[in-house]
């Protein structure tokens, strides 16, 4: 954990540096999203307005804008439109996630499904996706359309795969990686590759940015899943044990099950086979996680993907944008917002 704490200032700075670099365009992305989500249906407008007011890091939009700038894009507003499109896909998945997980709080505020209902939340999430597809068609690039439509399909399949393996404490690490690759990393990969596509870069640069985004996304999700069991870190309002209570099997539990003794494995299986897990169940799991130093093991796994992401940018010439994206690879391990 010492390494993580030491890196915090540098990594948080890299996020703000990226944001500052494309600040004018990010404001236009926000305007584009608001204009696209306007609706004559009162409930749709209320729900989308509420969702936008909850904010967010806009990391995926920043990745599209930053990648486009790295590739020298400067002719027009396609980067703004596609950054907005990527964010709309992300927002739609959040709305659907909260219904699936019966979530009640996101970004410190009540979720749409708790204020209104599940049916409305699913339909408004679908509305966002439909607006997103309109924007893809408006862009007119078949490569972009194929990439983002395929990404939306993979995200949905990742959600189903996670549901299929809910409560399986003996899940293979390979299966977990398939889930988070589909659910999270695919959109990161699309966000960065789009920047290269609209800049008319060669295949080498497109693949490099896609590889960068995918490994950044894997790092991001592993860190997020690890935070759920890290009682020593209380960041950005994330409640310890949220995934645990929902029965989600993530990397900390997978690694724990690999290291645990037989009697401990049996108890973990009983805990996750229950329809409702209690606080003492979480306390027991956290004690084992501490016993086997699982948090450090998870961060070590994440570091592997950080290295892959950073090294993939070697095909680009040295510049400010490249430095920021390289430093951003560790952002997910140390973010405090």
Image (cartoon, rainbow, N blue to C red):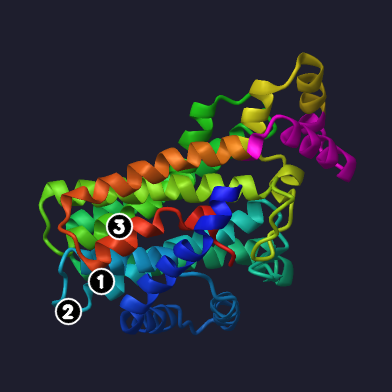
> Could you tell me residue 275's position as x and y percent?
81, 37
Between discs 2 and 3, the one toward the N terminus: 2
The answer to the question of whether label 1 and label 3 lie on touching residues, with beta carbons closer than 8 A, is no
Spatial CA distance of label 1 from label 3 is: 11 Å
Can you tell which of label 2 and label 3 is closer to the viewer?
3
Callout 1 secondary element: helix
- Location of residue 134 by image quarter: bottom left
> Which mark is in front, 1 or 3?
3
Which residue is nearer to you in this view: 115 or 262? 262
Q: Which residue is mark 3?
A: 192
Determine if the magenta segment contains residue 288. yes
User: Secondary structure beneath disc 3?
Assistant: helix
- In this rendering, position of residue 215 left or right of residue 39: left
Residue 300 belongs to magenta span: no
Residue position for label 1: 79
Q: CA distance from mark 2 to mark 3?
A: 18 Å
72 on left or right of 152: left
Q: Nearer the viewer, residue 271 or 145?
A: 271
In the rendered structure, which segment of residues is drawn in magenta?
271-295
Badges 2 and 1: C-beta atoms under 8 Å apart? yes
Whole-Å distance between the Cαs marked 2 and 1?
8 Å
Give the crowd class for mark 1: few <14, some 14-19, many >=20 residues within 10 Å.
many
Tell me residue 48's x, y (percent).
54, 76
Taking the image as shown, residue 41 lies to the left or right of residue 258, namely left
**Residue placed under numbered mark 2 in the picture:** 76
């Amino acid at each position: 954990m010492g390494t993580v704490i030491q890196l915090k200032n540098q990594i948080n700075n890299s996020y703000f540096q990226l944001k500052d670099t494309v600040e004018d365009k990010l404001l236009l992305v926000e305007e584009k999203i608001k204009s696209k989500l306007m609706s004559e249906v009162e409930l749709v407008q209320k729900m989308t307005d509420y969702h936008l007011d909850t904010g967010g890091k806009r990391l995926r939009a920043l990745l599209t804008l930053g990648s486009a700038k790295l590739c020298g894009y400067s002719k027009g507003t396609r980067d703004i439109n596609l950054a907005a499109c990527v964010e709309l896909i992300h927002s739609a998945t959040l709305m659907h996630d909260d219904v699936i997980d019966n979530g009640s709080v996101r970004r410190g505020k009540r979720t749409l499904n708790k204020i209104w209902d599940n049916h409305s939340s699913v339909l408004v999430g679908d509305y966002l996706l439909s607006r997103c597809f309109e924007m893809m068609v408006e862009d007119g690039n078949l490569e972009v359309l194929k990439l983002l439509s395929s990404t939306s399909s993979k995200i949905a399949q990742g959600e189903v795969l996670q549901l299929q393996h809910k409560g399986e404490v003996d899940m293979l690490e390979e299966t977990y990686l398939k889930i988070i690759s589909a659910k999270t990393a695919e959109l990161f990969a699309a966000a960065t590759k789009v920047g290269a596509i609209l800049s008319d870069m060669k295949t080498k640069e497109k693949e490099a940015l896609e590889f960068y985004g995918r490994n950044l996304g894997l790092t991001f999700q592993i860190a997020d899943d690890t935070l759920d069991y890290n009682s020593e870190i209380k960041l950005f309002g994330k409640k310890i044990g949220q995934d645990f209570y929902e029965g989600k099997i993530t990397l900390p539990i997978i690694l724990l099950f690999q290291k645990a003794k037989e009697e401990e494995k049996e108890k973990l299986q009983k805990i996750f086979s229950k329809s409702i897990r209690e606080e003492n169940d979480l306390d027991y799991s956290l004690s084992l996680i501490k016993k086997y130093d699982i948090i450090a093991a998870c961060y070590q796994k994440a570091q592997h993907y950080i290295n892959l992401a950073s090294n993939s940018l070697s095909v680009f010439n040295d510049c400010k944008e490249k430095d920021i994206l390289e430093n951003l690879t560790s952002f997910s391990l140390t973010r405090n917002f």
